[in-house]
Image: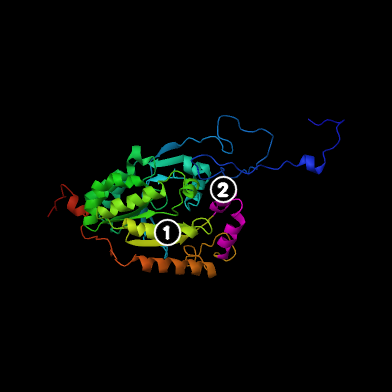
Amino acid sequence: MNDPDREPLDDSEAWQPIAPPVPRKGRGAVTNLQGRYEVDQREAFDDGWQPTGEEEEGTAPALRTQVFEERAKSILTRNQSPDIPFSVSLNPYRGCEHGCIYCFARPTHSYLGLSPGLDFESRIYAKVNAPELLARELAKPSYEPEPIALGVNTDAWQPVERDLRITRRVIEVLAERGHPFAAITKSSLIERDLDLLVPMAQRNQFMAAITITTLDADIARTLEPRAASPLRRLRTIRTLAEAGIPVGVSIAPVIPFVTEPDMERVLQACAEAGASSASYIVLRLPWEVAPLFQQWLSAHFPQRAERVMSRVRDMRGGKDYDSSFSQRMKGTGLWADLLKQRFHKAVRRLGLNERRHGILDMSAFVSAKIVREKPQLDLF
């Protein structure tokens, strides 16, 4: 209520700066940034109230993960992108509890009316009927088999998979039908399914990639807060390789001045662990990922935030992101070329990418005609 006897506020008294977002322990995003489809726009306002409780100073209250069952209508996603080495993918979950701040899949939560920020990593949708949908798809007489990429958007072995086991049941369907697939993950939980994966790899029906962005555990703890630690991922590479599974490392994303200095060390550590191939992708910031990532930079690397974004824009034609097929994965310009040279020199020195595992074998796929228990007899 206005006080008529009070002098008007001067500019310095009227303006209250908004405190920078406070990180939450175990979470990547520092805010619940609105999705681009929201009708009502909200703006932060400092009303003088501060959160209270027993949380550590400089951290916000913990956020509990919620898991919702989803009965999907379809399970295989197809694309025609020329810069992606697969055309069919399967994702058992929407959202990912790993909370990687750079995740290009974050904007998909906007389609659900949720935030690509904290909602994406704390409100997980489990496609509980994924195995049944897959079995039905593979049983169609018209189905043409081609390798499926598992867990490309959101990690198929994220923490909730330990209890729900949807990914394992999907693999059981693929194994039963002799259908090849490839998987990429940051989780050591993939080791749980070696009993299914090893026989498929022996028949050239499976290969894996482990994503490692940095060997610095402190950076990884805020960058990918609920993924396995870098050292644990190296051990997973060794476990898969020793089991006879072709395994590569994906250095994705390469973040200038954050993970980029670690590129050669990551490649060397992975080669020593048994990786036979390697790839990299430069940081991508589509849609809401750009502001979310910049909030993360301000919270964790305030002194180098401007420098990081300047280098990102140098590789994106002056923009935060360029979605052009020819540029979105590797970037362009001087710095992108230098990264490319560094990567290829290290790969050659370490002997990576020398052994090509070839195309996964489709010949063992069991078609619907073969698995039909009681084929319909001809009338004549």
Image location (x, y in percent) of residue 297: 57, 51
Image location (x, y in percent) of residue 35: 55, 47
Task: Kindly tell me whether residue 309 is visible in this rendering.
Answer: yes
**Amino acid type, residue under disc 1 in the picture:** Arg
**Amino acid type, residue under disc 2 in the picture:** His
- Residue 33, compared with residue 200, is above or below; it is above
Label 2: which secondary element? helix
Image location (x, y in percent) of residue 320: 57, 59
Horizontal placement of 347 versus 206: left or right?
right
Residue displayed at 49% across by 63% down = 328
Q: Which residues, given as a range, are shown in magenta?
A: 287-314
Q: Are marks 2 and 1 in contact (CB under 8 Å)?
A: no
Q: Residue 241 sits in which quadrant?
A: bottom left
- Residue 52, compared with residue 242, is above or below; it is above
Q: Which residue is mark 2?
A: 300
Horizontal placement of 81 versus 324: left or right?
left
- Residue 53, compared with residue 349, is above or below; it is above
